[in-house]
Image (spheres, rainbow, N blue to C red):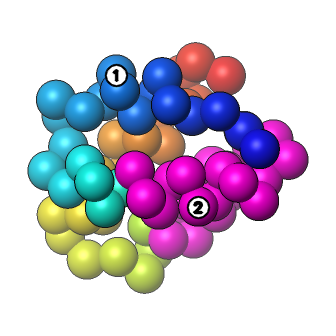
Amino acid sequence: MVDITNALLEIRPYVEYYQKLKELAESIAREAQSIEEVIKKLEEEEERASEPFKTDIRILINHLRAFR
C-alpha cells in the first residue's frame, strides 16, 4: 500500500470534496505498488469525473507529482 495520507492532509484546504477524494485515493493506494501507479489510476478517474470533483483529483495528482 502506498501512503498518501500526508498528501491528502496537505491539499485538504484546497479541495471541495475532500471526503470523496480521500476515499477514492485510499482505495487506489491500497492496491497500488508505487506512487506512479496511484497517479496513473487517478488520471484515469479524472477523465471520467465531472467538475468540480475533476479539479480536486487534479490538485491531488499535481501534489503527488511535486513531492514524489
Q: Residues within 10 Å of mark 1 (few under 14, many from 20)?
A: few
Vertical placement of 6 versus 62: above or below?
above
Vertical placement of 14 versus 36: above or below?
above
User: Circle 1 is placed at which residue position?
Assistant: 10
Q: Name the image quarter holding residue 1.
A: top right
Vertical placement of 24 versus 3: above or below?
below
Instruction: Report the residue at 43% width, 81% height from top.
Output: 48
Q: Residues within 10 Å of mark 2 (few under 14, many from 20)?
A: few
Label drawn at residue 27: 2
Which residue is nearer to you in this view: 8 or 41?
A: 8
Secondary structure type for disc 1: helix
Instruction: Report the residue at 20% width, 56% height from top.
Output: 17
Q: Per the image, is 28 magenta?
A: yes
Give the residues in magenta.
Answer: 22-45
- Magenta stretch, main secondary structure class: helix
Tell us which disc is closer to us: 1 or 2.
2
Label drawn at residue 28: none
Marks 1,2: beta carbons within 8 A: no
Q: Per the image, is 23 magenta?
A: yes
What is the x, y in percent for residue 26?
55, 52
Q: Is 56 placed left or right of 58 in the picture? A: left
Farthest residue, direction right:
33
Q: Is 30 placed left or right of 61 in the picture? A: right
Which residue is nearer to you in this view: 64 or 12?
A: 12
Vertical placement of 38 versus 54: above or below?
above
Q: Is 18 placed left or right of 61 in the picture? A: left
